[in-house]
Amino acid sequence: MTTPPPEAITWAEVDLAAYRANVHALQQWVGPRVQVFAVVKANAYGHGLVPVARAALQAGAARLVVHRLEEGLALRAAGITAPILLLGYVPLAAAETVARARLIPTVITLDFLRALGAHAPADAPHPVHINVDTGMGRYGLLPHEVVDFLRAASGIPGVQVEGIYTHFATADEADTTYLRHQWRVFGEVLAAVQAAGLMPPLRHACNSAAIFALPEAHLDAVRPGIATYGLQPSAAWPAPVPLKPVLTWKSRVARVRTLPAGSSIGYGRTFVTQKPTTVALVPVGYGDGYVRRLSNRAQVLVRGQRAAVLGRVSMDQIVVDVSHIPGVRLEDEVVLVGCQRGACIPAEEVAAWAETINYEVTTLLLPRVRRVYVDGG
C-alpha cells in the first residue's frame, strides 16, 4: 500500500510506470511507422495533466493532444516543448497567444489562419491541422469544403497546414457500419486532396477504440486516449494488448459503529437497516466526483472485501456495510476504484453502476481528490 499524505482524506494514486507501459504497448501494436499522439485533455482524463504529459513523452509519444487553449498553455508553462495539438475551438482574439506558445491549432476558418499567420515568424510558418467532419456533426469542415479551404490556405503567408484528421462517432460500438462509412468518406476526401496536390504530411483518424476496430485507418498517426490510462475503449473492442489501469482511487474509514434495526442512513431515508448493521463512514462524495447515481448501488473495497454503499451518496460522505468484514478499524484504507488485496473494482464496473462510461469515472475526479504519483520504473 502506498502511504498517502497524512492530511489526505481521499486521494488517487496514479501509476506513471503503468501509463508509460500502456503507451509503449500501443506503439508496438500500431508499429514504428505510425506516430502516437497521446491525448491528455481534461486534466489527462482526471489523472493529472503535467505529470501524465511528461510520462507520455518519456514513453515515446510523438506529441501531445489537448482540447482547449488553456491546457496547451499549462503544458508550456510547465516547460514542455513538444508539439501540442489543440482539437477544439480557439477564439480569434487568441491567435497571437497560440503563435507565441507555438501550439498547433485545429483551424476551420480562413480568418483564424490569417490572424495566426500575421503573428508567425517570417522564417517559420506556423503549423495547423484541419478537422474533416465525416459524420460527427460537431467541429470541422464538411467533406466538400476541404479542397477549396486547403487551396485558399496555401495562399496565406505565415501558416502551413501540417495535418488533416477526422473523428469517428461509433468506433466503440460492435456494429462497424457507420464507422466504415466515415472511413470511406475520409478516404474520398484524402483522394481529392491528393489529386489537388494539397496533401498535408500528417493524416490521422483513430481514437483508442478505432485503433483496434479499424487497423487500416492507422494512417500516419493515432490518437489514443482512454487506452493509455489502462481502461478499455469499449466492451465491443477490448484492447488486444496488455493494459494496466493507471489510477486507483482511495479514501479512509472515518468511523465504525453498529446501527440497530430500523436505522435510516443518509438523506431521504432511502436505506433503512433491517437488522443490526455494522457500518463504516467514508469521507468521499459527489463533491469529490463520486456521483450521486452510485447511491445504494456501488461497492467499495475494505480489507480486500466488497462493502455495499448504503443510502444516498452525499457531497462529502458515504456509508458502507462492513458487517461481514472482521476487524474494520478507524483509518483503514478504502478503495473506490482499483484493487486491494487481490480484489478489484474496475472503473468499468463503477461506470455501469453510475450508468455512464469509464471515461467519466476518472475525468470527474475533482481537485480536492489529491493525486499521488507513483513510479515503479
Image (tube, rainbow, N blue to C red):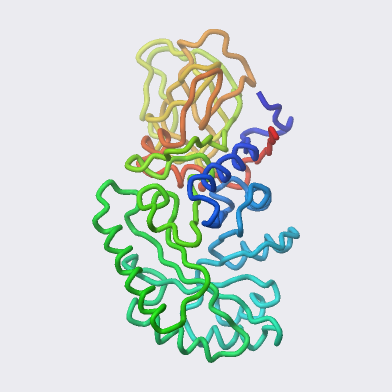
Left or right: residue 139 compared with residue 33? left
Where does residue 271 sit, x and y in percent of width and height?
37, 25
Q: Is residue 259 above or below residue 16?
A: above
Where does residue 13 sit, x and y in percent of width and height?
63, 35
Left or right: residue 252 compared with residue 106? right
Q: Is residue 44 above or below residue 70?
A: above
Where does residue 286 sit, x and y in percent of width and height?
50, 41
Asked where in the image residue 196 lies, by quadrant, the reply is bottom left
Taking depth in this image into account, of 258 and 130 the one nearest to the observer is 130
Residue 104 seen in the current view? yes
Name the residue: 60% across, 76% down.
127
Name the residue: 53% across, 33% down.
317
Taking depth in this image into account, of 3 and 298 the one nearest to the observer is 3
Where does residue 377 sit, x and y in percent of width and height?
70, 35
In the rendered image, the quadrant that contains the N terminus is top right
Taking depth in this image into account, of 191 and 357 the one nearest to the observer is 191
Residue 39 seen in the current view? no
Name the residue: 41% across, 19% down.
263
